[in-house]
Image (tube, coloured by chain):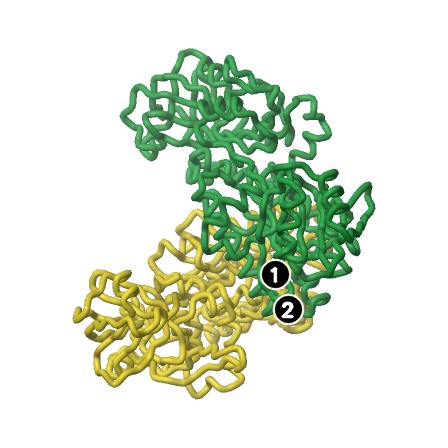
Chain colours: A yellow, B green
């Protein structure tokens, strides 16, 4: 049941239809607390049979106090202590409001494609538009309008929402405040780095699926790793898209380094490398990681992006798996320049010619591994709902976990022309955010 | 392997030769299972149970459960499998033990068929326990054993043998009331799909739920030609279908255009159209082909078409191990030109909806996505209603149509033997395997191993 809010000059009075009052156990002159997102206000109940079942008349003061736009429909839930209008969902997608331009808003429409299934207040906002002490934010809320007009995003002052889906880094104190105020209904709640990822999963049963990794503190760490592995990677703990990735191997007294994308080997001796490492570590934390002998296609390295998401059903689901093929003789499988992508099945069956039964079992094994990883993360007390897991399969067909991306690129399915998966990727976090609000 | 086994509560069996009626575990495992102090317990596998002495010993490996020779043989438990354990009511249940009741006669379980049945076992490493394929005539009610074939993961084959009744059964054949009662008495309510319902049942039951009623085409039982003639006064297009029928057999499309009534049907692999200008001839014809109570007269829908035939959608709905309904896949179908049915067995074709709806019906990706969500939402609702009616279903094929105004219609719920081969019709072998595996996952949940 969806309700239209009709403004009236009567301050803090809320007028409802007799049937609705009966259903929610409300009586004339009851004083109730009305909540919308994180804002609340006291209101007086008035009952009238003159208004229709799907309307609620609200005093202007109430509407302003709760910062509720009247151009959209809402659901209403009643509790012992209060009434709640909603759902209220926030999409915290940018750092600065000024960057939310027409083009960005156009793009964000993909998130709300299932809006007619739940209605309520769903809005896009930025880090700098939040007024934490007032529990409000400036944002662009979705207004589907009617059949003859195009849906739009409307700018307004809005209540901080019951659940938040965020895709932007936040200062620690603001993040903690939002998590506290929403009662841990903000996801993804922690943007951990590669070092944390490795430490966290090393304590779990998935340790055997992690490539051996150490924090790079000196040449000794590198030598130790090279003692066990022919080739290792140097990776910044905080990095994406393979930036700063180096591969290192050693032959007698010389070290051979290579940057990504087909660049030549650079050789260094012990003292040169010591200096090189010192410089690297001046600004960032680095990891040394064993290079797995991954499946290859025509001398190209391959890896898999497994998109794991929550929706309105319990638990995690695998939305899709994309095989990434890097450039020939490169050091990574990043495909953005001269590489390409396939669906996992297409890649393994049609390109590497594996048998369907084997591919089926491998896919299930990969999904199971990622599911276990997600469940461990759930146990940590943080709130995750939308992850892009990087995984490789070695030439003995064993899967290895490489990284978990918390702000993974939603456009990945488009690279394999899978528009339906793309729309699922966009919609699932909204379904999860909806579930978190408690509305249906 | 043992690390995984330890965490996943999986055990291999070992034989104790020197003692009788005893079960021994490593003390750590006993503690984990909460039975460290037990001395007397029962142990069960399927319908077989035995009272045993329970012991712990550091000599027993952490991944093993040791059972006395006599216990193993009275439980009839295959010792080459890995088992999960449930403790309930002072009983150690080894399982899951899943039965696949696929044929009436054991003679149908030929080596070739058994080879094909391996398709059920591809996710065995997540199921564990025993999977036994059997036929109805292999069920020995006197001793409560079944003669069947148990899956052996080491050699990837089926081993013939005598086993207890399974804990949960996926059945694909009809059962008499007597058989149903017998199984119910031994297993309890653990057979799915437990009750085959026809199109008339579907209509009568579902129309009582207001959220589903609008998706059901108006339907009445055929008693005599008046049933058709009366309905033609309301709808100018009708379908007449057998109450219990499959594969698009004996379906008649009746179309009224001014004073002429045209009836199309599929006879002997060809489409036949007959026209009637007077009621008498119409009555005569209808009386000759239809029988009282055996047919349904249903509102004809103006469904979207392709290739001169109607399009419909098969939605595969299956329950997972936690008993949540999930959509395993949506596959489209259209029939031969001018065909009145879309069944593959009548020359129809299957299609993957993404490309098809985009290329042939000009739908945008957003429209296709919304359509899929609507359909899945509706199917979940219908499945929940079936649960509420007391049916125990685990795998269903819902046929949905969409009319030219965009309304969804429920055409039929295939619950007797929803055929996973439709996945092969769209060259999706992985989906085919998944559909089969899901049946086992649900059976495992039904057996108590969630």
Position in image of residue B449 (x %, y %): 44, 36
Compared to B134, does A277 lie above or below? below
Judge whether A334 appears above or below B227 on screen. below
| Tags 2 and 1 on a common chain | yes
Locate the N terminus of chain A and report the quarter of the image it occupies. Answer: bottom left
Helix, strand, or loop for circle 2?
Answer: helix
Q: Which residue is mark 2?
A: A415
Q: Quadrant of residue A155?
A: bottom left
**Left or right of A14 in this view: B10:** right
Disc 2 to disc 1, how far (Cα)?
9 Å
Residue, x 35% and y 24% (percent of image)?
B57
Give A185 or A387, whichever is nearer the viewer: A185
* Residue A126 placement, left or right of B316: left
Residue B308: % across, % down: 77, 59
What chain letter is assigned to the residue under label 2? A
Name the residue tied to disc 1: A322
């Amino acid at each position: 049941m969806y309700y239209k809010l009709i403004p009236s000059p009567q301050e803090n009075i809320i007028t409802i239809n007799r049937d609705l009052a009966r259903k929610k156990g409300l009586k004339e002159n009851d004083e109730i607390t009305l909540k919308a997102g994180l804002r609340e206000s006291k209101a007086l109940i008035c009952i009238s049979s003159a208004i229709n079942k799907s309307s609620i008349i609200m005093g202007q003061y109430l509407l302003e106090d709760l910062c509720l736009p009247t151009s959209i429909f809402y659901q209403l839930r009643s509790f012992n202590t209060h009434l709640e209008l909603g759902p209220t969902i926030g999409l915290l997608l940018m750092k600065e409001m000024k960057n939310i331009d027409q083009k960005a808003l156009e793009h964000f429409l993909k998130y709300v494609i299932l809006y007619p299934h739940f209605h309520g207040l769903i809005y896009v906002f930025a880090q700098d538009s939040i007024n934490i002490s007032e529990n409000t934010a400036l944002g662009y809320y979705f207004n589907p309008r009617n059949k003859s007009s195009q849906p739009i995003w409307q700018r307004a002052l809005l209540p901080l929402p019951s659940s938040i889906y965020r895709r932007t880094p936040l200062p620690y104190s603001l993040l903690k405040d939002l998590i506290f105020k929403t009662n841990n209904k903000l996801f993804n709640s922690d943007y951990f780095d590669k070092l944390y990822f490795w430490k966290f999963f090393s304590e779990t049963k998935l340790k055997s699926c992690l490539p051996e990794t150490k924090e790079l503190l000196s040449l000794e760490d590198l030598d130790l790793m090279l003692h066990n592995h022919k080739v290792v990677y140097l990776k910044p703990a905080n990095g994406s898209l393979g930036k700063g990735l180096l591969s290192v191997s050693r032959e007698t007294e010389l070290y051979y380094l290579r940057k990504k994308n087909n660049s030549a080997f650079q050789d260094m001796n012990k003292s040169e490398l010591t200096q090189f490492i010192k410089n690297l570590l001046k600004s960032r934390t680095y990891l040394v990681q064993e290079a797995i002998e991954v499946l290859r296609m025509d001398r190209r390295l391959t890896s898999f992006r497994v998109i794991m998401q929550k929706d309105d059903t319990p638990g995690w689901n695998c939305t899709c798996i994309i095989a990434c093929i890097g450039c020939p003789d490169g050091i990574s499988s990043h495909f953005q320049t001269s590489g390409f992508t396939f669906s996992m099945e297409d890649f393994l069956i049609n390109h590497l010619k594996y048998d369907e039964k084997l591919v089926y079992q491998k896919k299930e094994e990969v999904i199971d591994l990622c599911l276990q990883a997600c469940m461990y993360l759930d146990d940590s007390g943080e709130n995750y709902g939308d992850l892009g897991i990087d995984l490789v399969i070695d030439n003995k067909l064993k899967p290895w976990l490489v990284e978990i991306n918390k702000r993974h690129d939603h456009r990945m399915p488009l690279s394999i022309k899978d528009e339906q998966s793309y729309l699922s990727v966009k919609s699932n976090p909204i379904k999860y955010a909806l579930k978190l609000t408690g509305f249906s | 392997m043992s690390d995984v086994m330890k965490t996943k509560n999986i055990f291999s069996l070992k034989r104790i030769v020197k003692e009788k009626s005893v079960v021994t575990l490593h003390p750590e495992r006993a503690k984990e299972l909460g039975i460290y102090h037990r001395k007397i317990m029962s142990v069960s596998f399927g319908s077989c149970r035995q009272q045993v002495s329970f012991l712990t010993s550091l000599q027993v490996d952490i991944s093993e459960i040791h059972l006395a020779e006599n216990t193993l043989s009275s439980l009839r438990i295959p010792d080459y499998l890995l088992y999960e354990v449930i403790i309930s009511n002072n009983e150690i249940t080894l399982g899951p033990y899943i039965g696949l009741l696929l044929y009436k006669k054991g003679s149908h379980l030929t080596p070739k068929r058994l080879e094909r049945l391996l398709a059920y076992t591809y996710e065995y490493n997540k199921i564990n326990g025993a999977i036994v394929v059997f036929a109805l005539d292999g069920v020995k009610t006197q001793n409560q054993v079944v003669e069947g074939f148990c899956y052996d993961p080491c050699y990837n084959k089926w081993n013939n043998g005598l086993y207890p009744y399974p804990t949960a059964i996926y059945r694909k054949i009809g059962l008499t009331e007597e058989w149903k009662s017998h199984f119910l008495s031994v297993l309890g309510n653990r057979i799915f799909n437990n009750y085959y319902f026809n199109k008339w049942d579907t209509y009568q039951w579902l129309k009582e739920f207001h959220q589903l009623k609008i998706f059901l085409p108006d339907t009445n039982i055929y008693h005599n030609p008046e049933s058709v003639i009366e309905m033609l006064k309301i709808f100018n297009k009708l379908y007449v279908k057998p109450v219990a029928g499959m594969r698009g057999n004996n379906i008649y499309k009746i179309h009224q255009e001014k004073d002429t009534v045209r009836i199309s049907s599929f006879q002997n692999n060809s489409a036949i159209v007959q026209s009637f200008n007077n009621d008498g001839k119409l009555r005569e014809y209808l009386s000759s082909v239809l029988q009282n109570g055996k047919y349904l007269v249903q509102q004809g829908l103006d469904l979207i078409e392709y290739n001169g035939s109607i399009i419909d959608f098969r939605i595969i709905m299956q329950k997972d191990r936690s008993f949540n309904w999930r959509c395993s896949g949506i596959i489209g179908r259209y029939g031969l030109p001018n065909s009145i049915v879309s069944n593959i067995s009548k020359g129809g074709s299957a299609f993957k909806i993404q490309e098809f709806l985009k290329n042939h019906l000009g739908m945008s990706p957003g429209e296709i996505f919304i359509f899929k969500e609507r359909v899945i939402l509706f199917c979940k609702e219908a499945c929940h209603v079936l649960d509420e009616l007391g049916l125990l279903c685990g795998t269903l094929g819902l046929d949905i149509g969409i009319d030219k105004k965009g309304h969804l219609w429920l055409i039929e719920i295939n619950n007797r033997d929803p055929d996973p081969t439709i996945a092969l019709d769209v060259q999706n072998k992985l989906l085919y395997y998944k559909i089969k595996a899901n049946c086992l996952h649900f059976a495992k949940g039904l057996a108590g191993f969630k």
